[in-house]
Image: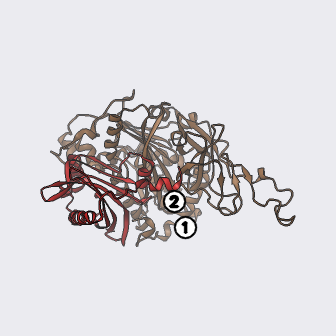
Amino acid sequence: MSEQAITSKLFRPRLVGLQRAIALAREVEAFNVEYCAVLDAGLVEQWPDFFTEDGLYRITARENAELGMPVGLVYCQGRNMMIDRAIAIGRTQMFAPRYNLHLVSNTRVTEEQADGTIVAQANFVLLQTLIEGPSTIHMAGVFYDRFVRDGENLLLAERQAIYDTTIIANDLVYPL
Amino acid sequence: MHSTHAVLNRTVRSKDVGLDTCVWPADALHFIPDWVYTNEAVYAREMELIFRGKTWNYVALEAEIPETGDYKRSYVGDTPVVVSRAEDGSINVFENRCAHRGAEFCRHSQGKATEFVCPYHQWSYDLKGNLQGVPFKRGVNKTGGMPKDFKNEDHGLKKLFVTTRNGVIFASYSAEVEAIEDYLQPEIRKDFDVVFPGKKLKILGYYKNELPCNWKMYHENLKDPYHATLLHSFLVVFGLLVAGNKSAMIADAKHGRHGTMASAKSDAVVSSENKKEMRSFHEGMSLRDDRFLDFVKEFDSEWSVTMQTVWPNLVVQREMNTLGVRQIVPNGPNSMLMQWTMFGYEDDTEEMTQHRLRQGNLMGPAGFLGLEDNEAMKFVQEGVRRSSSDVNVIKLDADRIGTSDTLISEACIRGMYQYYRQVMGFGEAA
């Protein structure tokens, strides 16, 4: 397979009209703002609330996504696995203290399905600051998402955080 | 933060000086001097005597390059190499350096090729690293070009010796290194062959990270069963490893350079006496979804976990059903890269693959165990680089060297450094 064929694998064409895509993108943006506010405040135990009961959360390298490899740096099938991870990070895991700051942009809605499911993506950058370090770009990538409606809110049925950062700096503690 | 971004990024002068000042403390078995982790001259000698010495270095899995022309970038020590499958089915490992002007010509982490062409002046090499073509070799209009006595066969890529065992590929700079079967030694081969019985592997994907620590710390961490129940409260809380349950720290009897940290999952409860010793113990924790701790007994082995260190650059991970190899790439005394390749077997059911993926949450740079190890090793490197005191104390289970049947032991670390001192030629203080 050519280089271009591999790197273009992740591109999703837009299957929804422009005006509708813009309106839905504003909802998705509002969701991501709340999502990042919780994570950046260190409230990791509230993070699973953004997902449906059987939601999927996976973080993986772009290399894996492009090669069609299923492995996850984090691989949570269902909100209960996310709750377990959040509690482990929040209460039992040993790591140096750090600040996280997410920047999310280029929000793009590519599809609205008959049942209301929204297929969307957004670029993210995670800035990390250790106690005696500068603020560094810890990870950069794209969220590939599926949202469903829950009353007036959106919930994530699936979030695949695909990072470009080929060599992770030591580790990743908190969810993206 | 990558180590190159660190603000406090200096080594105390006395811990990075000439080899002639590198003298091991007198009680050599029970102390490790800080300079083994921090000294550039020591690092350079390690590259020469260990990684380019009489060792087999892991470079890839055969499952990654099954067909002719499949290749993968890799490393031996800190030297970039290419692993390539030729037309005759042979596996070839050569340095990723054009024989002409030194360009690192192979830029993709893996792929498929019919030949390797250096982009700078388009010298081309076959899949075994032999020089095939030199553009304008005879010049233009009878001027320029290579001298008449220039022979392609004198200017191929630097080739390494290659061996395999059950689908695992190793390379060496040494013609004298023993056969891989002998290299692994029976104690280590036994559990290696459990993970690699010759069945076809299915690659599940990769993790790559930089650890801001010396490469030897990774070996030590997996030869240090003492830390497992103390640092990793997760293991204890969920009964995966409890001080007192069946376990072993096995070293190869010949050199003590390889190791297997082995344990059997237990439903035993932790005694109140043991709890008191473990500050990280959390009573009453339970998982909402404990599927990922299920252990499917798939091997004929008394152990549910074997973590193997194969000197000098390979870790074979069998943490219950999550399987992987980790390649250690040293990157100066204060840094290393870790390249993880996670896999299952070609005959796995989809259910088994999903189980392996879920269980993968234990390991890797965001794994419940993995991230704690990475954090701890970073702390150690920072500590040994910046402090005025200069030795590590290795006194647990003090009379033993190598294999130990108790977790509360540093015998295996002691054995590794006894071997290391001999290979590196480090004398002890009188």
Question: What quarter of the picture does the C terminus of chain B occupy?
Answer: bottom right
Q: Are marks 2 and 1 on the same chain?
A: yes
Please report, as a chain letter, where disc 2 is located. B
Chain identity for the colour brown used in the image: B
> Can you identify the residue that label 1 sits on?
B17
Residue A149 lies, with reference to residue B91, above or below; the image says below
- B172 vs B417, nearest the viewer: B172
Question: What quarter of the picture does the N terminus of chain B occupy?
Answer: bottom left
Residue B342 spot, x, y in % from top left: 42, 44
- A19 vs B381, nearest the viewer: A19
- B78 vs B302, nearest the viewer: B78
Q: Is residue B143 left or right of residue B84?
A: right
Chain A color in figure: red
The residue lying furthest to the top in this view is B300
Residue B281 spot, x, y in % from top left: 21, 48
Residue B235 spot, x, y in % from top left: 28, 44
Q: Mark 2 is on which residue type?
A: Asn
The residue drawn where x is 67% and y is 43% is B175
> Can you identify the residue that label 2 sits on?
B331
- B127 vs A131, nearest the viewer: B127
Q: Mark 1 is on which residue type?
A: Val
Q: Is residue B231 left or right of residue B257?
A: left
Q: Earlier in the sequence, mark 2 or mark 1?
A: 1
